[in-house]
Image: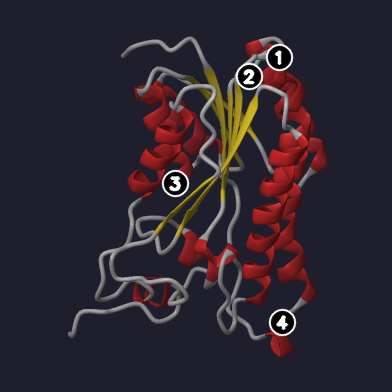
Amino acid sequence: MSDSGKTAVVTGASSGIGASTARALAQAGYKVIVGARRLDRLEALAREIGGRALPLDVTDPASVEAFVAGVRGMVSESLHLLVNNAGGAIGLDRLEDSHDDSWETMFATNVLGVVRVTRAFLPALVASGAGHIVNVGSTAGRETYPGGSGYTAAKHGLKALTQTLRLELLGRPVRVTEVAPGLVGETEFSLVRFGGDAERARAVYKGLDPLTPEDVADCIVWAATRPAHVNIDEIVLRPLAQAQASSTAPYRRPS
């Protein structure tokens, strides 16, 4: 494996897109530090890729503070790439049936968690002389669907946050990118959304070929490995069976 001499941090890396991104970055030569709540999975991943693992709950300010302190102890004052991947959806309730705690959790993870982690690492990203922030968004940040108001609102918020940050960092050596996938299989996204209901989670992808976590990781690594003067503002990717504004009505093969 070639050594790029660069260090990357990936949040939400214990499974799915985060884990695949960590593997792909390590293969591209990055020294990778991964963070997530499930430390056992995280440590196994770190051993696999020759990286480092630290516990992280982006919804807990104290956890973020401890994580950032741990990373600083490993990389000193400089960080090249931050991939804000931690996020997720809870439920599919219509607004009239929704609960505040679900909304609060989705905003705490998808928006405030990104704010906390990004804010803490910005000085190190600037100090690298060629920093890069990649936020993993969603096509849900570009469209809406019945029952998705909490998640789509959070991902629209993340998109706005990303675009605003790009403006605020203009003139400083930090690139900002959003990678926004549509339906992604082989993750725990739908399983978490439906409270562990495996049958309901599998039904989301029935009759179609969704994106894989590796597809999304490939986009993240491609954006990160462009020349330092090239900023990829956003990448939107969907499976062939999903068109714009069809999150809940993709084409499914006849059974």
The residue at which mark 4 appears reads as: 98
The residue at which mark 3 appears reads as: 17
Q: In the figure, residue 241 lies in which quadrant?
A: bottom left
Count numbered badges in the picture.
4
Asked if one can make out residue 188 in the rendered structure from this viewpoint, the answer is yes
Q: Amino acid at mark 1?
A: Ala
State the CA–CA distance, disc 1 to disc 2: 7 Å
Q: Is 128 located above or below residue 120 in the figure?
A: above
Q: Quadrant of the C terminus?
A: bottom left
Nearer to us: label 2 or label 3:
2
State the CA–CA distance, disc 4 to disc 2: 40 Å
Q: What residue appears at the point 76 percent right and 50 percent down from the top-left corner? A: 112
State the CA–CA distance, disc 4 to disc 3: 27 Å
State the CA–CA distance, disc 4 to disc 1: 43 Å
Q: In the figure, residue 135 lies in which quadrant?
A: top right
Local crowd at mark 4 within 10 Å, few (<14), some, or many (≥20)?
A: some
Nearer to us: label 4 or label 2:
2
State the CA–CA distance, disc 1 to disc 3: 27 Å
